[in-house]
Image: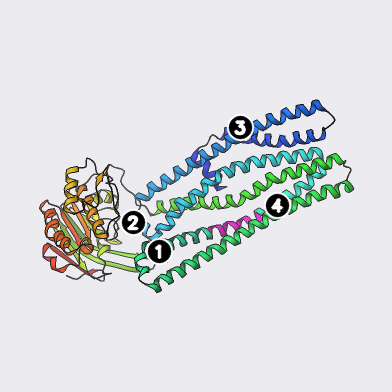
Amino acid sequence: MQLLDFFSKESRPPKSQIIFTALVSGLANGYLLMIMNDAAASVGRNEDLQMQNFFLFFADLLLLIYTRQYSLKQAIVIAENAIDRVRIRITNKLRQTELAFIETTGHAAIFTRITQDASLISESAIILINACQQMIVVVICLLYIAWLSIPGFIVTGIVIVLSIFMYLYNSRYINKQLHEASTKEADFFTGIDSILMGFKEIKINHKKNNALFDHIKIISKEAKDIKVATGLNFVIDLMFAQTAFFIVCAVIIFALPILTFINANEVVGITVAVLFLFGPLSTVVGALPIFGRANVAVENLYSLEAEIDLASKPLRNTPIEIPEFTSLELEQVNFCYHDTSNSSTFGIGPINLKINQGETVFIVGGNGSGKSTLVKLITGLYFPASGALYFNNQPLEEADYCHYREMYSSIFADFHLFESLYGVDDIDQKRMTELLSTMKLEKKTGFKNNRFSNTDLSTGQRKRLAYIAAMMENKQIYVFDEWAADQDPEFRKYFYEVLLKDLKQQGKTIIAVSHDDRYFSVADKIIKLESGVIVN
């Protein structure tokens, strides 16, 4: 079972102690049945035996409470340790994978596996331990029934075997349905993400809004239908087990006295044992759907990790060193996007260009011309499909990219603004105050305890805050992807005529994606793209 293997592999639990306490808990639970049956049989006949059973009952109950509490507590610790270990490991690998993998897989699919699937595994741990304890009770009850009557044991055993066989017969189909439901759930979350990320666009386009919602409804209905079908299969299994046990009670009460020699006390004892058995067995059967979903969740987590491993590129196991930048050259570089069927959707190239230290380079062109793709190639976020990058006149290998990327500080068109300045040591508070004033943000936000006090700003203000964060990083090359597009005319002019010139005077290399042709004179070099190729 994947779930048991998962806990064993990821948490390294104290197996012997857990197995021992679970066994003792199950035995104590089963022994309660024998005490109660013995006490019921001696009512009004043997007061000493009644008193003995009374003390045995409470001693056994205390033992049951202690061992069950210990085993369930350990289940929580084991589950959370395992989940924490896997989530941190996957997160660590995720941050080291490539942008193309993130874009292809999708945020929703990744988020669903790390959060929803992990939570399901966590919740299943207590149910797993409890079900194991109840299985021990089931075994003890069966042994007790065998001690009372072999025919009664055979009848009960046949019903249990049939129930197990039916579950195993359906489990393969059920697991397939659970996988399909999990995929549909990820698609549903992708739809919700589209609403949140594209809220402005759908708010001003009624047809787009309705079409997106109709698509989400279709996905939701498909997920619901699969989960309902899966649930019905579990219900069939559960109802079969419940009905079968009532039939067992009827056979024991009505048929066994006719078919074999059995007295009334034995009939009562077997019936009580079967009814006592019904509770633990229902717990086990009721836990099976959760185990099925948890097993699928384990497979989802491990498949995500395997996909990340497969998409990751080998990196040299050496400390990150930031090289000194003198030149970058792209020679016959091509790159192409692919859809899920691996068909080409859009590409750029062949690209030939050279950027020298201290230059201000503008990348211009219409929408969809490939400007952002070229920026991602230059910054090392994409690997070229063909051609080569030469850094300081040396060919750039994929294993060198982790060092190469360290030269850049970038503000992309779809940038993310971090509240804290992660990775920036010894922050100059005076410099920060000056930058906030320069960007006219001193009344909008502050900086304390290594974080901005407020990032709930307009897009233009957020870009200015991102600019401040980039300045504090003090990198050699700055990339601005349409930074001025959301600024007012005053700040747009200030960006081109003051900020960029100041960076150039500091010896920084600047790569800016721009549509502002009135400021093209600021650039040392202009790279114009059309349909993915340089035209000037």
Q: State how far apart marks 1 and 2 are (Cα).
A: 23 Å
Q: Earlier in the sequence, mark 1 or mark 3?
A: 3
Describe residue 261's horizontal placement relative to residue 105 as left or right: right
Q: Earlier in the sequence, mark 1 or mark 2?
A: 2
Q: State how far apart marks 4 and 1 are (Cα).
A: 45 Å
Q: How is the image coloured?
A: rainbow
Give yes or no for contact between labels 1 and 3 (Cβ–Cβ under 8 Å).
no
User: Visible in this render: residue 347?
Assistant: yes
Q: In the orientation shown, which residue stands out farthest toward the top? A: 48
**Kind of residue at disc 3:** Tyr
Q: Quadrant of residue 341?
A: bottom left
Q: Which span of residues is magenta-colored?
A: 168-179
**Kind of residue at disc 1:** Ile
Q: State how far apart marks 4 and 2 are (Cα).
A: 49 Å
Q: Nearer the viewer, residue 10 or 393?
A: 10
Q: In the orientation shown, which residue stands out farthest toward the front? A: 443
Is residue 176 shown in magenta? yes
Give yes or no for contact between labels 4 and 3 (Cβ–Cβ under 8 Å).
no
Name the residue that disc number 4 marks.
Answer: 163
**Kind of residue at disc 2:** Leu
SS for dot 1: helix
Name the residue that disc number 1 marks.
Answer: 195
Q: Earlier in the sequence, mark 4 or mark 3?
A: 3
